[in-house]
Image (cartoon, rainbow, N blue to C red):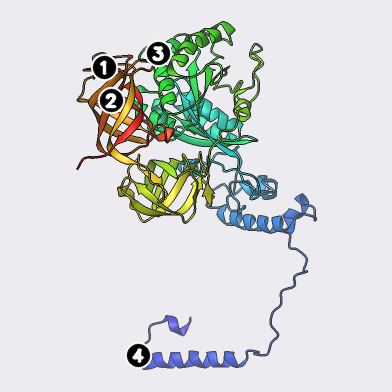
Amino acid sequence: MDPRDTAPDSWEQEDDVEATIDGQLESAFTTLNVNAKPFVPNVNAAEFVPAFGLKAHPANVDSAVAVEKMSTMEMSESAAPVENGDAEMTAEEPWDQKEVEPSEEEPGGGVCVDRGPEEPDETAPEMMEEEEEVLVPKVPPTQPDAPKKEHINVVFIGHVDAGKSTIGGQIMYLTGMVDKRTLEKYEREAKEKNRETWYLSWALDTNQEERDKGKTVEVGRAYFETDKKHFTILDAPGHKSFVPNMIGGASQADLAVLVISARKGEFETGFEKGGQTREHAMLAKTAGVKHLIVLVNKMDDPTVNWSLERYEECKEKLVPFLKKVGFNPKKDVHFMPCSGLTGANLKEPANMCSWYTGLPFIPHLDSLPNFNRSSDGPVRLPIVDKYKDMGTVILGKLESGSISKAQQLVMMPNRHVVEVLSLLSDDVETDDAEPGENLKLRLKGIEEEEILPGFILCNAENLCHSGRTFDAQIVIIEHKSIICPGYNAVLHIHTCIEEVQITALICLVDKKTGEKSKTRPRFVKQDQVCIARLRTAGTICLETFKDFPQMGRFTLRDEGKTIAIGKVLKLVAERD
């Protein structure tokens, strides 16, 4: 037994033990060879391959892969007894036949011991789920010298349950943004809840409430690329309770996809008064969407069965309405049949649908003409959302101008001077951004609490206008009684939502001739056009429609319905 391990009888004895140990150490030091040659590893030595590896591997395996596998082997050797007690696994299924190259998800390779689909690991399904959730948006690698693809924001609108999220999920799968494994997992989970047709929409409806009820609440975001363009999908909610969220999504879009269900009864419900097909198409037009694609979904339904008559019937009902809203059916609107659940006519032409001769959905998007956006205008970035993440992060679509890293900008209407710390365009970090891109900016010099959705980032040389009173031309779309001065509603202008009061009616405008009435009207009613003075509860950022259309058009809503649409004609200076 080591003398140090026993308790001493007396403290004098303890000192002796210490002394003997010191003596042993000294003698050991004297035998050390101080002048020995330094150790030089032999780089050209033969590579060590374990005996059981010789059978499966030829000698010409990449040395890097072999080294990597060695580390994997050591890991699995040590972990084997602990992991579910199935140490036999390595015996029946040699490690070197598993994965020769590291998978995309683990760039380091090797640490994660994948046991294949045959034996699911029951111990930690929750952990697996969380890991997979993070992996959903795969960012396509961008070549540094490749020209920037044009950014287009596509908003999916339409009545509740028309299949907007399912089509969005299917597009992400077809373009490779969601891998098959993740979708299979969603399919399994959806089956457990007896909702197997919902699994595609889960790629965009990420929170639990949306998945349980099958209804989108917030505007889902995802992106995909084609050969020529980069698209951001904005998946708007169809339910009438969440129309304010849908307006926020439509205000960022360049292109709207109106999804309608061809199933008997569903199209009629969405299109009648009170259905969201009408309201969404109108709100999209008001939000400044110029081009509309109408996807007639659920064509594979047994009640429809890719019938041309049903397709034409939906088309005939929609065209007059879209004309009334302001779309030109010949130029701005394009109809196409599809099935979101099976993916027919989204990427490849559908065999069942021989009567449709146009391009499928994704190639059609790719063939659209470019939007001409000027990057030399003033910086205008309406804020959609904000949160804290190692500083203040804001989300929004750059309407005009260009932003670069370390640029000084001004947050209106509070006139906070901020600096851009980093720029993410669709979750890919960049140094500068062009108009039309969906951005995440990390800002310095402002707290998250000081920002509200609807604030606007501008450059200091050219600030946007802010105020509370303005004159606007309004079209009353739907209101049962009359509207008089003093009427209150909710104003939606770009990404801003504010309470507003009509303080005065200035004149009526004739719809056909555009003539203004000489006398002031005492009230306005449905289908009339008037010029009125409006006053908001708080200061908001806005521009006249003539100067900057994206920030000069608005909608008025009350009691969950869209009452009027309008455009800002003149900003009225505040009287102190």
Helix, strand, or loop for circle 2? strand
Q: Nearer the viewer, residue 219 or 176?
A: 219
Between the residue at mark 4 and the residue at mark 2, the CA separation in whole angstroms equals: 104 Å
Q: Amino acid at mark 4?
A: Ser
Give residue 10's mark. 4
In this picture, residue 94 sits left or right of residue 256: right
**Label 4 or label 2, whichever comes before in sequence order:** 4
Residue corresponding to mark 1: 524
Helix, strand, or loop for circle 4? loop
Helix, strand, or loop for circle 1? loop
Q: Is residue 199 visible?
A: no
Between the residue at mark 2 and the residue at mark 1, the CA separation in whole angstroms equals: 10 Å
Q: Amino acid at mark 2?
A: Ala
In this picture, residue 41 sits left or right of residue 505: right
Q: Nearer the viewer, residue 63 or 310?
A: 310
Residue corresponding to mark 3: 512
Between the residue at mark 3 and the residue at mark 1, the CA separation in whole angstroms equals: 17 Å
Question: How many other residues sit within 10 Å of disc 1, few (<14), some (14-19) or many (≥20)?
Answer: many
**Label 1 or label 4, whichever comes before in sequence order:** 4
In this picture, residue 198 sits left or right of residue 112: left
